[in-house]
């Protein structure tokens, strides 16, 4: 996306946000109706992509008929609707409630998968994506939680149809967490905290091996050991770099 396109996208988004914040609240007043009617309306709204309306209908159905025939499906649909609206707090609250009340449900693997998706989504920021800004230096808590969610899914439900997707997403999260640790190590370098920088880079090698950040972690370790006067450790790192990254400037 070029700069002009990005600028237009941001301007339109800003206008949309402004319009939403300045317009009066037009929340749907859900009329009294049968559970069948409410659920039918909610499903239609979801199919049309109107997740705000679907959420209000599902919430009404959940509160008015908590023990009805649709109770479990309503909870599952609410999780998805909250996710589609970037409503992290309500999505996670409903996910945790579902797991607590239905630990052996046939779709509980889907709920664990959704927990991972919700946490991944919470770690994303639209403006950064539009401008191609790398913000892997921000707090990675939601990514760490997502990694644990997907890991739990794979361990508890290895044959789940969501397991393969979860594994791919875990690799993506590993890349993000590795870059975060590199940012931390680079901060330590700026502060001349060479021992801390080396330790953080070592953590990348131990916890996130195979990610694109591995080469940078070795570079940081070589620099840090050099500054600390640890010649043997630096030589060992350079030997590893030469074997794995022969084109790196530090070994040429």
Image: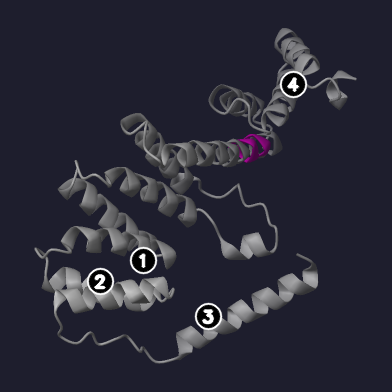
10 Å crowding of disc 1: few (<14), some (14-19), many (20+): many
In the rendered image, which residue does mark 4 sit on? 222
Check disc 1 and report its element: helix, strand or loop.
Answer: helix
Q: On residue 17, which mark appears?
A: 3
Q: Quarter-wise, where is residue 86 in the image? A: bottom left
CA gap, disc 3 and disc 1: 20 Å
In the rendered image, which residue does mark 1 sit on? 81
Q: Position of residue 83 (x, y in %)?
A: 40, 61
Q: Disc 1 or 4, which lies upstream in sequence? A: 1
Check disc 2 and report its element: helix, strand or loop.
Answer: helix
Q: Disc 4 or 2, which lies upstream in sequence? A: 2
**Tag in front: 3 or 4:** 3
Contact, CB < 8 Å: mark 2 with mark 1?
yes
Q: Position of residue 113 (x, y in %)?
A: 38, 46
The answer to whether 103 appears left or right of 173 in the picture is left
Contact, CB < 8 Å: mark 3 with mark 4?
no
Q: Position of residue 2 (x, y in %)?
A: 79, 67
Vertical position of residue 103 compared to residue 215: above or below: below
């Amino acid at each position: 996306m070029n700069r002009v396109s990005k600028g237009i996208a941001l301007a339109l988004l800003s206008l949309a946000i402004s319009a939403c914040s300045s317009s009066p609240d037009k929340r749907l007043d859900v009329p009294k109706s049968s559970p069948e009617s409410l659920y039918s309306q909610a499903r239609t709204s979801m199919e049309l992509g109107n997740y705000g309306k679907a959420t209000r209908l599902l919430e009404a159905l959940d509160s008015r008929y908590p023990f009805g025939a649709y109770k479990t499906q309503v909870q599952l649909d609410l999780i998805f609707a909250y996710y589609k609206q970037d409503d992290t707090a309500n999505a996670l609250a409903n996910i945790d409630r579902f797991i607590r009340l239905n630990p052996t449900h046939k779709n509980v693997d889907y709920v664990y998968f959704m927990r991972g998706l919700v946490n991944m989504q919470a770690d994303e920021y639209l403006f950064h994506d539009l401008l191609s800004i790398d913000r892997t230096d921000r707090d990675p808590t939601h990514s760490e939680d997502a990694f644990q969610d997907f890991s739990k899914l794979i361990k508890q439900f290895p044959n789940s149809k969501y397991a393969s997707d979860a594994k791919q997403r875990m690799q993506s999260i590993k890349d993000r967490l590795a870059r975060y640790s590199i940012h931390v190590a680079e901060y330590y370098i700026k502060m001349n905290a060479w021992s801390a920088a080396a330790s953080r880079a070592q953590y990348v090698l131990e916890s996130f091996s195979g990610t694109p950040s591995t080469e940078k972690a070795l570079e940081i370790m070589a620099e840090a050991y050099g500054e600390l006067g640890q010649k043997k450790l630096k030589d060992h790192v350079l030997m590893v770099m030469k074997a794995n990254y022969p084109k790196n400037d530090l070994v040429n």
